[in-house]
Amino acid sequence: MDDRDAALLRAHEHAAAWLDSLATRPVPPRAGVADVVAALGTDLPDGPSPAADVVDLLATACGPGLTAMPSGRFYGMVIGGSHPAALAADWLTSAWDQNSALRTVTPAHTAVEDVTSAWLLELLGLPASGAVGFVTGATTANFTALAAARGEVLRRVGWDVRRDGLTGAPRVRVLVGAERHESVDLALSYLGLGAPEVVAADDQGRVSVAALEEALADPASTSRDGGSTSAPTIVVLQAGNVHSGAFDPFGPAVEAAHRHGAWVHVDGAFGLFAAASPSYRHLVAGYEGADSWATDAHKTLNVPYDCGLAIVADPVPLRAAMGMHGDYLIQSAAGDPLDKVPELSRRGRAFPVWAVLRALGRSGVADLVDGFCRHAATFADAVRALDGEVLHDVVFTQVCAAFGDDARTQDVVRRVLDDGTAWMSGSRWHDRAVLRVSVSSWATTDADVAVSVDALGRAVAAARA
């Protein structure tokens, strides 16, 4: 116990020092992989070491190789910092060490998960009867919801995928927008559904409803044995394009898909929480009519990794896809958390989500979203003031900019990272090199944005010189 207490105290000291450094430290890491390996050492010790010494070594060796992702000046990917309440709850989650699979065995976590699920459904304006699975992230959330979709659309044509697998099954059509996130394709690959059919998108990345209608109009597909059958269909829509932040036109797209008997899934890794803000709820108008949704709690909601949310309007297909039974498991007639996720063993992910929702409340979550969008608009104005080009309508938290030809834009990105004040990533969008700014951390202040804009200005001036 003395060893444990000493290790926890040392971990707290290192954690506090790290968090205190975020306000001023350069955002990029100062050491590479080889440097950290050298500092850690590569020989496995022959005997035990005091836990506190192990913590010291880990913290000192890894410190220079850490990226200040929880900083208010990290805009490189859609990564939120950890809200204080969520971070503290996550520490408790590790200390409590609950395998949150079963209702009867872990009543504390199940109670928190039930309350948190109801809060999320209310906050997002989704059906109160829906099921919420707490998974690792948006990729797994997409996988989980699409597994429910796969099973249900095949059930409707008389095929039991859980019993019979996919061999000989009718082909499942999956229609996606041209600018969906690649994690959707990855989830479909995991599910054995292959590459999706791509539907055209507009210049903001929003799926074209006319093109979707046209794709849905062909009701037949070819089964794997060569026969013709009515095509079970899934349509994947997007809440928040990773480059433009744009949202698909949910109302007409969902109506068209349902008219043709399709299941509709919404990938909303960061954009789903637009629904929590009265100022931005219009972006998701009609999305509540979909059948499933996916999001990352560690993006817009700012809980620690790993925590995604898979939401399915009808719990029955989700439980059919994910549920399991074991004679040794103490299962509840009311259903168990394991019925809604791919994992049997998992940490208590609902604890930090409950904590951040309880700490912020309804108005606090709205203020969080509004603040991200306000900061993004400030960045867009700054780009224009620097004679850069904002390549889309800034409707949410994303800004993609160019500063002349590809070579100059890439030079600006490199100089911003070399400066170290802020992290803004390069990417390619619409066949152009871009600098991409993603605002998603609770810690980002007006002062953070101001110094980041100054760093961008220095990079642009140096690139032009």
Image (cartoon, helix red, strand yellow):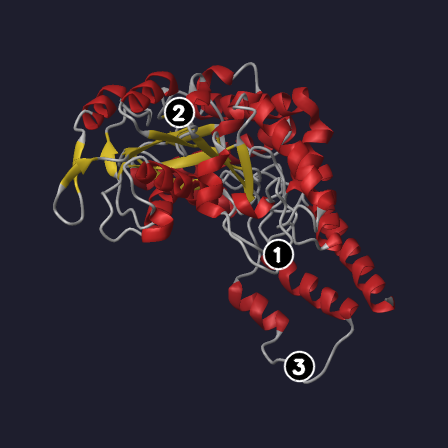
Name the residue: 28% across, 51% down.
166
Query: What quarter of the picture does the C terminus occupy?
Result: top left
Q: Is residue 75 above or below residue 370?
A: below
| Residue 329 numbered tag | 1
Q: Nearer the viewer, mark 1 or mark 3?
A: 1
* Image position, residue 321 (x, y; %): 44, 45
Q: Nearer the viewer, residue 239 or 116?
A: 116
Q: Residues within 10 Å of mark 1 (few under 14, many from 20)?
A: few
For the residues bearing labels 2 and 1, Cβ distance under 8 angstroms: no
- Disc count in the image? 3
State which tag comes first along the sequence, 1 or 3: 3
The residue most toward the bottom is 46
**Left or right: where 203 falls relative to 336:** left
Disc 2 to disc 1, C-alpha distance: 44 Å
Asked which quadrant contains residue 406, the reply is top left
For the residues bearing labels 3 and 2, Cβ distance under 8 angstroms: no
Q: Residues within 10 Å of mark 3 (few under 14, many from 20)?
A: few
Q: Amino acid at mark 1?
A: Leu
Q: Which residue is mark 3?
A: 45
**Left or right: where 180 falls relative to 339:** left
Q: Amino acid at mark 2?
A: Ala
Under circle 1, the secondary element is loop
Q: Is residue 442 visible to us here?
A: no
Q: Nearer the viewer, residue 373 or 156?
A: 156
Disc 1 to disc 3, C-alpha distance: 38 Å
Q: Which residue is mark 2?
A: 246
* Image position, residue 56 (x, y; %): 74, 65
**Left or right: where 338 falls relative to 100:** left
Q: Amino acid at mark 3?
A: Pro
**Left or right: where 224 falls relative to 117:** left
Name the residue: 49% across, 45% down.
417
